[in-house]
């Protein structure tokens, strides 16, 4: 099974220029960064991903939210799909063999269905209330996350309202990684906050935030 970094950082355009945010996250030590820009045109998002890839270190992975075509054309590490995006079975056919495919799930039924899909990891949430997504699905809570993790054969990335204060409880449920947006991007110093997260991961989890396959 793939081993994800404990920190799955998201450069969300709702908090600023995703290129700038990605640089700050990477400067702080993040090595798995998703680029999320729901309102960008295809060309704008493509240019942003290409710009990020130019400064991203070789040991980092840049994931594109929703747009498999942009992930493929830009040479990004992969794409993350939602429940309303193109089916993973179809997207896997157009990705290169080494590109990652992530998939969002919001309950145990969706997580169970993903077991039959050609995905590399699943996201589960929102675990806690979140303000970074409009019309968010109901929170699954720690009990819901624990149930999904206990049944999943894919690595589980917990998402939704996760902070440094509640992350320990999230990891205790069996999550391989935590997707963090607001707790990183709302900081006055995103790079420093990212460093704090990585130190926390090492102290609490007993290992640094690394990526292995």
Image (tube, rainbow, N blue to C red):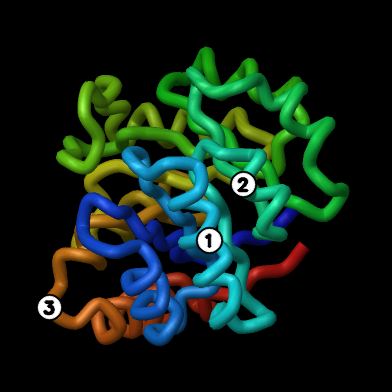
- The residue shown at (56%, 39%) is 67
Where is 97 relative to 105, above or below? below
Identify the disc placed on residue 49.
Answer: 1
- Helix, strand or loop status at disc 3: loop
Q: Which badge, 1 or 3, comes first in the chain's sequence? A: 1
- The residue shown at (49%, 28%) is 82
- The residue shown at (23%, 58%) is 163
Are circles 1 and 2 on residues that touch, CB within 8 Å? yes
| Real-space CA distance between mark 1 and mark 2, rounded to the nearest whole angstrom | 8 Å
> Where residue 144 sits in the image (x, y, percent)?
37, 27
> As rendered, which of 16 and 11 lies closer to the eye?
16
> Where residue 113 sits in the image (x, y, percent)?
63, 16
Q: Is 165 situated left or right of 103 in this image?
A: left
Identify the disc placed on residue 188.
Answer: 3
Residue at the extreme front = 43
> As rendered, which of 111 and 31 lies closer to the eye?
31
Q: Which badge, 1 or 2, comes first in the chain's sequence? A: 1
- The residue shown at (44%, 65%) is 7
Quarter of the picture holding the C terminus: bottom right
- Helix, strand or loop status at disc 2: helix
> Where residue 78 sits in the image (x, y, percent)?
66, 51
Quarter of the image holding residue 103?
A: top right
Q: Residues within 10 Å of mark 3 (few under 14, many from 20)?
A: few
Q: Is 114 situated left or right of 8 in this image?
A: right
Identify the disc placed on residue 70.
Answer: 2
Q: Would residue 46 be seen by someone viewing this image from the given angle?
A: yes
Quarter of the image holding residue 196?
A: bottom left
> Where residue 60 sits in the image (x, y, percent)?
61, 74
């Amino acid at each position: 099974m793939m081993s994800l970094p404990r920190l799955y950082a998201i450069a969300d355009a709702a908090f600023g220029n995703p290129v700038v945010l990605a640089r700050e996250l990477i400067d702080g030590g993040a090595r798995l960064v998703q680029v999320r820009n729901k309102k960008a045109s295809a060309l704008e998002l493509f240019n942003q991903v290409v710009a990020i890839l130019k400064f991203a270190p070789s040991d980092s992975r840049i994931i594109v939210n929703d747009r498999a075509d942009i992930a493929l054309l830009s040479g990004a590490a992969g794409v993350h799909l939602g429940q309303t995006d193109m089916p993973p079975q179809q997207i896997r056919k157009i990705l290169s063999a080494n590109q990652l495919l992530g998939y969002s799930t919001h309950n145990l039924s969706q997580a169970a269905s993903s077991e039959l899909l050609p995905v590399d990891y699943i996201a589960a949430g929102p675990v806690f209330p979140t303000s970074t997504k409009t019309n968010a699905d109901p929170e699954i809570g720690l009990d819901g996350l624990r149930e999904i993790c206990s049944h999943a054969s894919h690595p589980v990335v917990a998402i939704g309202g996760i902070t440094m204060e509640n992350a320990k409880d999230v990891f205790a449920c069996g999550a391989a990684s935590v997707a963090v947006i607001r707790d990183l991007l709302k900081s006055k110093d995103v790079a420093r906050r990212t460093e704090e997260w990585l130190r926390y991961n090492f102290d609490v989890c007993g290992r640094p935030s690394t990526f292995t396959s």
